[in-house]
Amino acid sequence: MGPSVQQTVVRMAQGYQLSQALYVAAELGVADALAAGPLDAHALAGAVGARADELARVVRALVTSGVFTETDDGAFALNDAAACLRRDAPGDTRAIVVDFGTEMYHAFGELLHTVRTGQPGFEALYGQPLFDHYTAHPDAEARGSARMRARSLLVAQDLAAAPLFDEAGIVVDVGGGIGTVLTAVLQAHPALSGVLYERTPVARLAGPYLAEHGLDDRCRIVEGDFFAQVPDGGDVYLLKSVLHDWDDDRCRTVLARCRAAMSPHARLVIVEIVLPDHTTDDPDLVPGALLDLIMLVYAGGRERTRSEFAGLLDATGFRLHGTTPLPSGPHLIEAHAR
C-alpha cells in the first residue's frame, strides 16, 4: 500500500471537516458578503458577524479545496465555486449545503448506531422520526424543503421535457413538496392541470410558491397523508423522491393507495435513483451510494435496484413498463396498472 493510497483514505476520513467549513461559510453568508468584491478578513468578519482570525482560517481551508480565492494582498474573493453559495445563485446550492450541515450532519454521527441496531441515526439523536421532527420544528421543515427544491430543479427540467404528459389532462404529484417539479411540468404543458398532494406543513409552503409562478389557478393543493389515501381523477400520478424515504412495507402502502385512486388508463411515474445490481469503483455511482446512506441514517428508507422496484410494483397491482435515465441523475420509472 503506497503513501498516495493512504493519503486518499485519510482525506476521505477528513471529509466531514471540509463539509463543516463549507456549511459555516454558507450559513454566515460569506459569498454574499464578497459579491461586491474582495474583502480582508476583518472587513469580511464584520460583514457576516464573525471573528476575523477564526473566519479566515475556515475560508483558507476552503481556498485550498477550490472554493473562494485569496488575493496577493491577503483579501478573500469569490470564484465560480464560491459564487454557487450566494443566496441568489441559480440552483440554490447554498440551501443544500446548509441543510447538509445541520441535522443531517449530526445524524451521520450516529451511523455506527444505525448499522448495529437498524434504528435511523436521526431518530436516535432527535428522539423521533424525521417527518415527525419536521412537523414539530418548522425551521427544520423549511430547510429540508429548500434543500429538496434545490435538488429538484434540474430533475424538474428533465421531467418537463419528457413526453409523459402530452395526452394527459391532470397530473397528481403525490408528496410533491412545495411544487418545484409540478411547476416545471405545468409551465411546459399549458393545457395540463395539477393536483399537489402533501402534508399540511409543506402544503402551506407550496401555496406561495405556486402563486409566485402564476399557477395557483391551474393547480389545486390537497392536504393529506399518502399512507391513508391519494386523490383520484388523475391521468398521471407522480412520485418523485418519495419511495426512497421509506422501507418496503411503507412503499407498498403508498403504491397501493395510488393504485386505488387510479383509473385503469392512468399511469404511474416514479422518479428515483436506480442502483446497479453490482457495485464497482465508479465515480458516477457515488451520488447514488451516498444518497442511499442518507436514507439509511436520516429517514430509514433506501435507494433500490430496478428489480427491487419491479417487485414493489408487482406486489401492488402494477407492472413495470420501463426505466429511463435522466440527464440530471435519477431514472424515470413508468408503471401501468395490471
Image (cartoon, grey):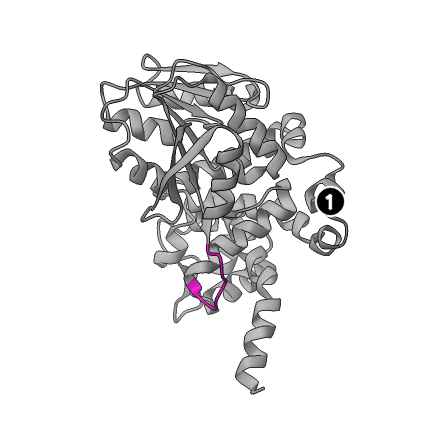
- Other residues around mark 1 within 10 Å, as few (<14) / some (14–19) / many (≥20): some
Image: magenta residue range: 276-283
100 with respect to 310 (left or right): right
Kindly state the secondary structure of the residue where label 1 is placed: loop
Q: Position of residue 202 (x, y in %)?
A: 52, 24
Q: Position of residue 104 (x, y in %)?
A: 61, 46
Q: Main secondary structure of the magenta part?
A: loop
Q: Residue at x 72, y 47 (%)?
A: 118
Q: Residue at x 32, y 23 (%)?
A: 213
Q: Position of residue 23 (x, y in %)?
A: 55, 51
Q: Position of residue 335 (x, y in %)?
A: 39, 33
Q: Residue at x 57, y 45 (%)?
A: 302
Q: Nearer the viewer, residue 67 or 131?
A: 131
Does the magenta portion include 116?
no
Q: For the C terminus, which image quadrant?
A: top left
Count of numbered circles on the image? 1
